[in-house]
Image (cartoon, rainbow, N blue to C red):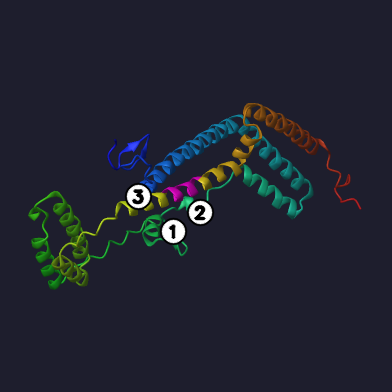
Amino acid sequence: MPSAGAEVDGGAVGDGGEPVAPRPEERLDRAVRAAEQALIEYEIAVDTFRIEVENFSRLHHQKLGPMYARLDELDARIAEAVAARSGDPEDIRRADEARARVMPMPAVEELFHGWMDGDGLFPEAAAMLTDQPVRPPQRVRPSEEARKLYRELARKAHPDLAQDDDERKRREEFITRVNAAYSRGDAPLLRELAEEWAAGPAPAERGPSPSEELYARLEWLAQRKELLTLVARELEEGAIGSMLRIAPDDPDRLLDEIAEQLLAQVAEREAELAALLEEPDTSEGPSGSVEA
């Protein structure tokens, strides 16, 4: 006869052989393990689709990118030809916008990253651009109180006084803060650090119980799944993901179809541009005067 708490075919049984319901903590543990496996499978599915989207995006760019670029160039040249004929300010504006799409200028933030903010250039950047000497940082001479506090803290909290690695790490981190405060001559902060050191290390917090850890794990798994769901939705609703969903079994055929459509559009634009460049301008008469 199996003893109390023994398991038969994966389930616990009592002294009389009757099944015993698992404890709540055991049920929670099984739920966590099941959720972990489900999340792993979901992550694999999302990562697989992400890789497919990235690969298809690369193919899309390699195969169709030059055609899109050719269309943008033709649109700009057509707009410029129309503007040259009409001289209309609105046509000129459209031509400028079309050309800007072909050769986008970098943003000011990109050109001056780290050199300017909403108020203009940083003083150091302006000085360098105008060949002026950069103003050196203000030197801080700590007060006598700051020097005294620093020396006392350095003696008490020196890492060489540690008895183990954890204590050495605590002392090193503390001394780093002390050095930073002393370098600024911050006597009030040094006083706070002295009080902190005198109080000693914070008592170790009570660790979570097994049940609390399992509940926290379940909560994290749920949050992770929500995040993955958002990632999957963005992939599916993006331009490349939407194209993949149209032809999941044969995306290459879809690229070929799009390429044919783009080639037809390129041919139409080239014909339109040729007509604009070859057609004589009839807006002026033989003598150069504008016809009524």
Residue 136 picture quarter = bottom left
**Are there few (<14), some (14-19), or many (20+) residues within 10 Å of tag 3?**
some
Q: Main secondary structure of the magenta part?
A: helix
Q: Position of residue 269 (x, y in %)?
A: 75, 36
Instruction: Say what secondary structure mark 2 lies in.
Output: helix
Foreground residue, 116 or 254? Answer: 254
Q: Which mark is residue 108?
A: 2
Instruction: Tell me which numbered mark, 3 or 1, is placed earlier along the sequence.
Output: 3
When the figure is inspected, residue 171 is found, relative to residue 44, above or below; the finding is below
Asked whether disc 3 touches disc 1, contact meaning CB atoms under 8 Å apart, the reply is no
Q: Which residue is mark 3?
A: 25
Helix or strand or loop: what does disc 3 sit on? Answer: helix
- Sequence-first tag of 3 and 2: 3
Residue 116 is labelled as: 1
49 left or right of 29 in image: right
Amino acid at dot 3: Glu
Left or right, residue 218 beside residue 101: left
Amino acid type, mark 2: Val
Range of magenta residues: 221-228
Q: Nearer the viewer, mark 3 or mark 1?
A: 3
Q: Is residue 251 left or right of residue 182?
A: right
Q: Residues within 10 Å of mark 1 (few under 14, many from 20)?
A: some
Task: Say which residue appears at 21% left-offset and 59% top-offset.
Answer: 204
Identify which residue is drawn at 65% across, 45% down.
99
Give the percent coordinates (x, y) of residue 262. 70, 33
Spatial CA distance of label 2 from label 1 is 9 Å
Q: Residue at x 66, y 30 (%)?
A: 254
The amino acid sitting under disc 1 is Met
On the image, the x and y values in percent for residue 7 come to 33, 38
The quadrant in which residue 173 appears is bottom left
x and y percentages locating residue 122 in the rendered image: 40, 61
Instruction: Look at the numbered disc 1 and give the secondary structure of its residue.
Output: strand
